Amino acid sequence: MKTKIALITGGYTGEAEVSFKSSAFVYSQLDHNKYDIYQITITKDAWFYVSDSGIKHAINKEDFTLVLDDSIVQFELAFIMVHGSPGEDGRLQSYFDLVGIPYTSCDALTSALTMNKGYTKAILADLNDLFLAKSVLLFENQRAQAVELVEDKLSLPYFVKPNAGGSSIGMTKVKVADELKVAIDKAFDAENTGSQVIVEEFVNGREFSEGIYRNVDGELVVLPATEVKTTREFFDFEAKYIPGLTEEITPTDLDVNQQLRIGKILKDIYVRLNCKGMVRIDFFLENDTDKFYFIEINTIPGQTPQSFIPQQVRAAGLTEQEFYGNLIEVALKK
């Protein structure tokens, strides 16, 4: 009998559009001979499944079941493909913990923590060989004196971004002091990104993104790295989602020593943050020092055909079906 999988998509933020694309790709790659897969859409207004005939069926939120053709569908696993809230900030994970359904992502605590860039950096501060850009964490009640707080501790240029949220929404690179206040206000006012802003000193180096996951044998597997080269000022929302603005090189030309170093660092990050499933970690390699600087971690990374993780899976000699199947089997073991 097939395992019943709820493939969760949608969400409460502007990242829902990307979630729909990610879930559609995952659905196309999963083994339908082995898994019975239902795409479940989550919005602020409703949680539902759309049948082949186009009829919308509501999810019973009391136990996450679905009434279909006079029978009750009980799911054995949730494959979470919701970028942003509530899929990436721990809310869905808490719900599934309450109703007793395993899921493919990090747990609620790790998901909530890693959505907060400043808190994540604090947890990672003493890891061997990992460096962190100097930063200032700003709260809403510090907004009036934010410029002074930043200029007192950091040197230009800066990256200003919401302390929660993804897809580089609300993010600005600040090169002159006069631009700082506007950038801070933009980050504070970005929708669905919390009421905190993080400002970091600029790191001059190459930018990379690399996936890591645990396989069915319990081993941590680091995927080949992707180097990101963009014609934009930085890897912002447009660079991420408008074709032609960014060159992505997978696998990239890190030398053997660099690959070994970053592989160990990524495993240490995964363990320190108690990650589960697949995560993607972004980092800089500083030009003059050869030091690896942490940027951020993404616990529900994009899964369109062009996304980093699928690129890296193919570069590793795996198929997406094998990779996603591994995530499912590991989660079911919980």
Image: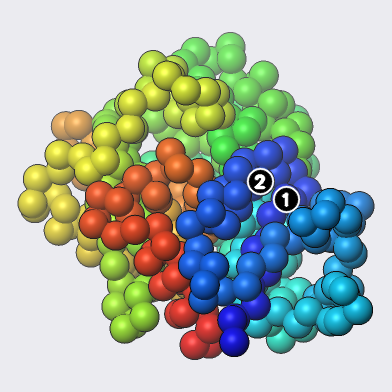
Q: Which label sits on residue 20?
A: 2
Residue 134 location, x and y as percent? 41, 41
| Mark earlier in primary sequence (1, 2) | 1
Local packing at callout 1 (Cα closer than 10 Å; few below 14, some 14-19, many 20+) is many
Residue 4 location, x and y as percent? 65, 77
For mark 2, give the secondary structure.
helix
For mark 1, give the secondary structure.
strand
Q: Is residue 156 above or below residue 189?
A: above
Residue 131 location, x and y as percent? 31, 50
The kind of residue tagged 1 is Gly
Residue visible at 49% across and 67% down?
31
User: Looking at the rendering, which quadrant does residue 168 occupy?
Assistant: top right
Q: Which residue matches tag 1?
A: 10
Q: Is residue 212 above or below residue 255?
A: below
Front residue of 171 and 324: 324
In this rendering, does residue 295 appear at all?
Answer: no
Contact, mark 1 vs mark 2 (Cβ under 8 Å): yes
Residue visible at 76% across and 37% down?
191
Is 252 left, or right, of 141 in this rendering? left
Q: Quadrant of the N terminus?
A: bottom right
The kind of residue tagged 2 is Phe
In this rendering, does residue 267 appear at all?
Answer: yes
